[in-house]
Amino acid sequence: MALYKNSLDFVSYINMGDIMKHYINRIINKEVINVKDGSRLGRVCDVCVDIKCGVITALIVPVVKNIFSFVGKKKEYFINWEYVVKVGEDIILIDTDVSKCVKICEQEENKAKE
């Protein structure tokens, strides 16, 4: 349990959490487009947050598989926040080489097999 110097610190902590939840909810499901090549990567399914600083550190976008890829490892784009150029009403623009952002999720598959 966190200790606060006074009740105002606790209220500030609660308000920051609410603000962060609101901001995250606005980002989830937005489409991500890479301005480098105009490619659509998919929709944000999750975010990484530094809770100490109260900032989003990365966006997570699942790699969309085609209908013929039943086997294989689950992949997702792990996009550092520094690559975000603009967050709009419907889309998020990024500027990066997406091949550097692909992350293979082996741990989740190993857990599912057990």
Image (cartoon, rainbow, N blue to C red):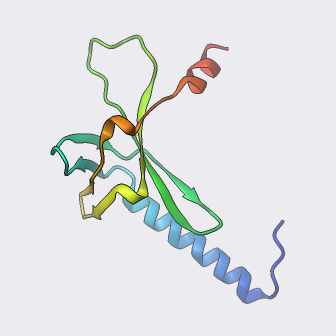
Which quadrant: the N terminus?
A: bottom right
- The residue nearer to you, when weighing 46 against 53, is 53
Q: Determine the residue positioned at 66% across, 76% down.
A: 13
Indicate the position of residue 109 as horizontal and vertical percent values. Answer: 56, 20
Q: Residue at x 42, y 14 (%)?
A: 72
| Image quadrant where residue 8 sits | bottom right
- Vertical placement of residue 73 versus 20, above or below: above
Label count reads 0
Quadrant (top left, top right, bottom left, bottom right) of the C terminus: top right
Q: Nearer the viewer, residue 111 or 85?
A: 85
Query: Is 57 situated left or right of 61 in this image?
Result: right
Who is closer to the viewer here, 20 or 51?
51
Q: Position of residue 70 (x, y in %)?
A: 37, 12
Q: Residue at x 40, y 59 (%)?
A: 82
Does 106 appear above or below 8? above
100 to the left or right of 112: left
21 displayed left or right of 59: right
Q: Residue at x 46, y 52 (%)?
A: 58
Point out residue 76 in the picture as x, y percentages from the top left corner.
42, 34
- Furthest-left residue in view? 38
Is residue 106 positioned above or below 57 on the image? above
Q: Quadrant of residue 68?
A: top left
Q: Position of residue 3 (x, y in %)?
A: 84, 75
